Image (cartoon, rainbow, N blue to C red):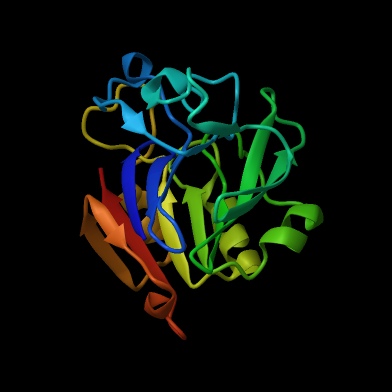
Amino acid sequence: MTIQYLGLSCLKFTIKNPQDVILITDPFDPKVTGLKIPHQKADLVISSQKKSPLSHHLNLISGVNNNKAQIIDSPGEYEIASVYMEALSIEGADNPANIFYIELEKITFAFLGGEGLVKGLTSTHLDVLEGVDVLVMPVGGNLDIRSAKEIISQIEPRIIIPTYFKVTGLKNPNLNDIDMFLKEAGNKNVDHVNTKLKLTKKDLPSQNRQTYIIKP
């Protein structure tokens, strides 16, 4: 699969095995954020907060209006095409929010959304997310570094993909730079990837945890 970072907590997963599927997370409103992004084609769209222009701007996705793209924005278990996922609610969020467990090409992911996660994870969350291969987490917004480090130690992923940090062109919201997270969290094995990350099951590190910074 390939993973493309589009800004904030929006990523595009292109899966080829066992069938072609495009999954997009948290589509945002370019007019609100200042980030320029073209319309995206998708088969699946997941949203961590359905009332937020930072994660539920469905007009960004071609195929939504004619039901060619399926939207997952409520808690529950889902199996669509070759993708299995479970959406878990975050209690106490001002705007109801979700985090997700996702299986893609035999790789397991925890997707923690963007602005909705402000505290650590509950035991219910960890029962589902602990031990996933890849942790996709917000690092520049509401979630403080201490909580981020605790989540990493609880889940113990083999790969971390940071999201929701300051990038060129972003006007709203005001986010921290990625370097603050890398410094405070003590990430040692860091690779910077231009535009797209190619990932297969055999690419997962067996020992040292890897962090990938994907350039939008």
In the image: residue 55, left or right of residue 177: right
45 or 56: nearer the viewer: 45
Does residue 57 appear anywhere in the picture?
no
Residue 86 in picture, x, y percent from top left? 68, 49
Depth order, front residue of 114/149 = 114
Above or below for 145 versus 131: above
Name the image quarter holding the N terminus. bottom left
Furthest-bottom residue in view? Answer: 207
Depicted 28 relative to depicted 157: above or below: above
**Above or below for 159 versus 140:** below
In the picture as drawn, the residue positioned furthest to the top comes out as 31
Q: Is residue 85 visible?
A: yes
**Residue 94 image position (x, y, % from top left):** 69, 23
Where is residue 133 drawn, in percent x and y?
53, 69
In this image, 136 relative to 98: left or right?
left
**Quadrant of the rendered image containing residue 212:** bottom left
